[in-house]
Amino acid sequence: MELEVRHLRVLCAIADHGSLHRAARQLGVAQPSLSTQLRRIEHALGGQLFLRTRAGCRPTPLGHAVLSRARPLVAELTSLVTEARAAAARAAGGARLRIGATASRALPGWLRRLRTRAPRTEPTLQMDASANCLLGLVAAGRLDMAFVHEVEGSPLRIPAGLCVRVLVEREPQFVSLAADHPAAALPEVRLADLAGDRWMVDSTVDGEWDALCRVLREAGLDSDMLHGDYLTAYSLAATGEVVTVSQPTARPRSELAIRPLQGDPIGVRLLLAARTESELDLAYAELEESYWEAAHQSPAYQTWLNRAGTHPRTTPRPARVPQTSHTDTHTDTPRRRRPIPVGP
């Protein structure tokens, strides 16, 4: 078998994700197919490139040597293809803006504002629960940018070379529960108020399952945890079957209440990532406006912001900050940051 660039992309994806399952998801192929392809690549190169364990995959010394040569080649070709497509789109009089995102109520307003600002550019949207998967697609040139959230305590694997701009430094996560749940009558809910409830969490959201387990453990609770996507979780929460983590921008329904958790034990950082800062400039201001528009349409979040005492639009922006991973430090209000390059 002759080695091709697509094979190098496979190796980089496996190394970046440390897992055949997650790499297959990013690449859009079945895991058995990816395993077969990896064996063929290893046979072509004459040795094992990854050690497979229950914990995942890690490169062998040969794998490290191959990856050190593969990454610059993949990055250079990705840049060439991206620039060529952009030039072709400009010559044709139009362009697409390929956006990836995890779930957010800011998305409809963001897309609307982008179309208004640049009517000749058509934004397209690809949704995924995994922020790491979306960031990988941006690095691979399959998306132009991604709006993602990073769960506190579970830093995202940001590919080298991407530029990242922080929209909100720490957004508190709320809880969704049935409107007739006893705790729904409270302005904010203690975890102890939910001691008898089952939680449903989407385990495909990077870091969320671990974050909730950690928070419940620190509160001395041993609650039942169920796997499920958030559409299912909200439906079951409305009937009182479960409670679930909720973004503060979520709107309540007649049968569903959205409440802050006392002490804001769970937080996320909201990020916009692209390959260049000029690409970020195309969309960041519209995303910022759309996010705060959604925030003010959520009664629970509006109350939380008012109680915090600082209007987000007047929060000063620091000039530049180094890229850091999440810590367990809690802040009183959502904070926003300017663009920061990541990687060499």
Image (cartoon, helix red, strand yellow):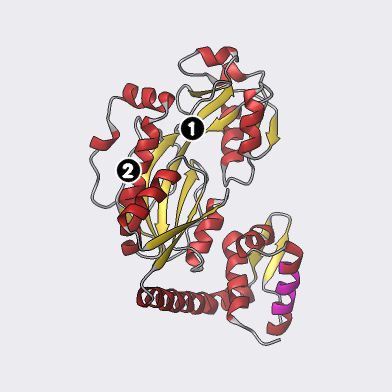
Q: Main secondary structure of the magenta part?
A: helix
| Type of amino acid under label 1 | Ala
Q: Which mark is residue 51?
A: none
Q: Nearer the viewer, residue 297 or 311?
A: 297
| Residue 263 shown in magenta | no
Q: Residue at x 41, y 27 (%)?
A: 301
Q: Nearer the viewer, residue 154 or 164?
A: 164
Image-based side of 178 in relation to 273, left or right = right
Q: Nearer the viewer, residue 45 or 76?
A: 76
Asked if residue 322 shows in the view, the reply is no
| Residue that protrudes farthest toward the bottom in the picture | 2
Asked if residue 121 shows in the view, the reply is yes
Q: Residue at x 70, y 73 (%)?
A: 38
Residue receiving disc 1: 250
Q: Is residue 90 above or below residue 231?
A: below
Quadrant, the N terminus: bottom right
- Rounded to the nearest angstrom, the CA distance separating label 1 from label 2 is 17 Å
The first of marks 1 and 2 along the sequence is 1
| Residue 35 shown in magenta | yes
Q: To which quarter of the image does residue 45 belong?
A: bottom right
Residue receiving disc 2: 289
Residue 73 is situated, as x and y percent measured from the top left of the image, at: 50, 79
Q: Nearer the viewer, residue 154 or 131?
A: 131
**In what element is the residue under mark 1?**
loop
In this picture, which residue range is highlighted in magenta?
Answer: 34-41
Residue 81 is situated, as x and y percent measured from the top left of the image, at: 46, 77
Q: Residue at x 72, y 73 (%)?
A: 37
